[in-house]
Image (tube, rainbow, N blue to C red):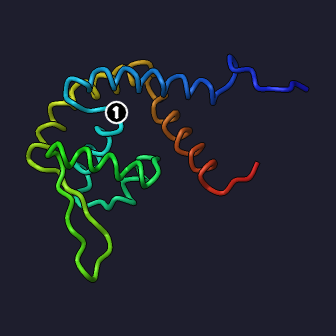
Amino acid sequence: MRSHVDPDQSVGFALKRLQQALRSRMDAALAEHGLTAPLYAVLAMLGEHPGLSNAELARRSFVAPPTMLRMLNTLSQAGLIDRAEPTPEQRIRGNVLTTKGRQRLTASSTPVQQFEDLLVAQAEPGQLEIVMRWLHDCAEQLDGHTRL
């Protein structure tokens, strides 16, 4: 029995390599818009789901709440989001895009879509649905209290 996983044959290592390559290329492309891939992701989530709370954004972005708070402060200081003050009966603080935030999201979406198109172009007909289902199923297995 081997004492370690061979990185050249590991699904996990291959996924991490892809993630790192995508993140590096996206950060470089988004820099001209004053964004990083994680900041873009927050803008995109708020574009699709206005009013998400800090905690929900952190969960959906796979970051710790303090990290999300720093990201939201950065976006707020740049005038890209508004952070609603919680009402007395509500502890949740909702976040929404400003007009400037919607414009920045639109302007920065082109390079992100180009990377998505590049990834999709690698799949043969029917493969994309299989890969997406497999990725989601694997994530559910790992998120869903499966013990090793």
Tell me: 36 left or right of 13.
left
Image location of residue 60, percent across then percent down = 41, 51
Image location of residue 106, percent across then percent down = 15, 36
* Foreground of the two, 39 or 116: 39
Q: Which residue occupies 27% across, 28% down?
A: 113
Q: Residue furthest left?
A: 99
Q: Quadrant of the N terminus?
A: top right
Q: Residue furthest right?
A: 1
Q: Determine whether the residue tagged by mark 1 lies in a helix, strand or loop.
A: helix
Q: Residue furthest bottom?
A: 89
Image location of residue 96, percent across then percent down = 19, 56
Q: Which residue occupies 56% across, 28% down?
A: 15
Tell me: 38 left or right of 74.
right
Image location of residue 62, percent across then percent down = 46, 47
Q: Which residue occupies 25% across, 81% down?
A: 88
Crowding around mark 1 (Cα neighbors within 10 Å: few <14, some 14 to 19, many 20+) is some
Quadrant in the rendering for residue 17: top right
Task: Kindly identify which residue carries mark 1.
Answer: 37
Q: Which residue occupies 22% across, 77% down?
A: 87
- In the rendered image of this protein, does residue 131 appear above or below residue 89? above
Amino acid under disc 1: Ala
- In the rendered image of this protein, does residue 8 appear above or below residue 39? above
* Foreground of the two, 27 or 47: 27
User: How many callouts does the rendering have?
Assistant: 1
- In the rendered image of this protein, does residue 93 appear above or below residue 136? below
Tell me: 102 left or right of 75.
left
